[in-house]
Amino acid sequence: MAKNLKIIVTIFLQICVAKASQSVSTNEFVAVSTTKPEVLTLSDFLAKIETRIEYTQTIKENTQRLQALERQNTQLQTTLDSVNLQLNSIQTLLEKLANAKIATQTKSLPTSCKDIKDSGNKVSGMYLIQPKYSSESFMVLCDMDTSGGGWAYFLSRFDGSQNFYLNWTDYKNGFGSLSGEFWLGLEALHQLTGFEANELLVELEDFEGGKVHAAYNAFAVGSEDEGYPMKVLGSYSGNAGDSLRYQAGMKFTTLDRDQDLRPGNNCAAQEKGSWWYNTCTMCNPTARYLRGNVTEADRWQIVYWDGFRGSAYSLKKVGMMVRPRGRYSSTVLPVKK
């Protein structure tokens, strides 16, 4: 554009000079010719105009760049505003979650299945509880129907689907599924029974449909430091036979931790289970799951309760559960060393 304007101005000046030349004499032409410095000045003027045009063009281009930057800035500001809104939403959500956590912590969990039952919930099933003196919560299977309800299962056998011949850590932490066969865990059992009196209910069933039970009005398990002993076993009632009495006061024994009273032998290895073995046992609910009568070679190494069908009959079902009952019974058995 600047180049075209320069050409136009040059042509215009040439026309003016030509017309002036026609109206003067030769002498005057000479005089006119002396105006060359003035023509040079016009060239300078053209140069200045060209410079001004280029400057104007530069300003225009810079203005366009500035406008583009302003548009980008507007877009960035819009994006920033959107991000700020999202951050505010996230902050609000975090505050709500924090408040919800505080509210959950403030609203204490039920301490037992009996606590749940007493609050009006009478549906058997799985619940999250936190025993009164425990820092941890855990899931339990609650029976809200049997003998007044409020029972928490710690052992369930009924089909042989779960391997029970496991080590100390497994028995401490628990294994299996609450919807199937399981062992709740020695630590959980200690938290449930070690700080307030509980009663124990044992339910048994054979493969012919016979059902019996054994109830104890007090039951407690000690801590891991003590060896998870059966510290308390109250008086017996029921029709299954008092086959747990021989284990009262015993520490818990597994295949990798021998705490029984049998010299030179691990009852867990011998009886194929894990239990509060004495010099061994009169019941073995965690042993191998077979069906009905067994051979002499399998005797003692099966799920049995001596007072019901003897030690050569593998039971179909065993359920063991506890329920708080208030103060400890006066029947407290010391831990045997």
Image (cartoon, rainbow, N blue to C red):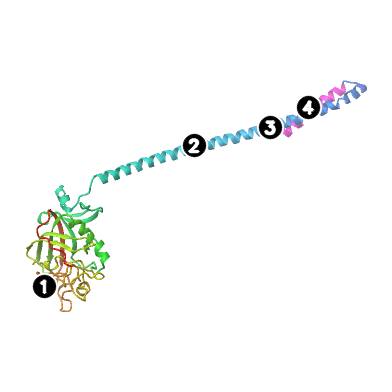
Q: Mark 1, residues whose alpha carbon is within 10 Å: few (<14), some, or many (≥20)? A: some
Query: Which residue is at the front of the view, 62 or 213?
Result: 213
In the rendered view, tell whether residue 88 sits above or below residue 289. Answer: above
- For the residues marked 2 and 3, what is the alpha-carbon distance in whole angstroms? 32 Å
Instruction: Kindly report which numbered mark, 1 or 3, lies closer to the viewer in this rendering.
Output: 1
Predominant SS along the magenta part: helix
- For the residues marked 1 and 3, what is the alpha-carbon distance in whole angstroms? 112 Å
Whichever of callouts 4 and 2 sits on the residue coming sooner in the sequence is 4
Whichever of callouts 2 and 3 sits on the residue coming sooner in the sequence is 3
Identify the residue under disc 4: 12
- Mark number, residue 310: 1
Instruction: Kindly report which numbered mark, 4 or 3, lies closer to the viewer in this rendering.
Output: 3
Whether the residues at callouts 1 and 4 have beta carbons within 8 Å, the answer is: no
Callout 4, which amino acid? Phe
Identify the residue under disc 3: 55
Instruction: Kindly report which numbered mark, 1 or 4, lies closer to the viewer in this rendering.
Output: 1
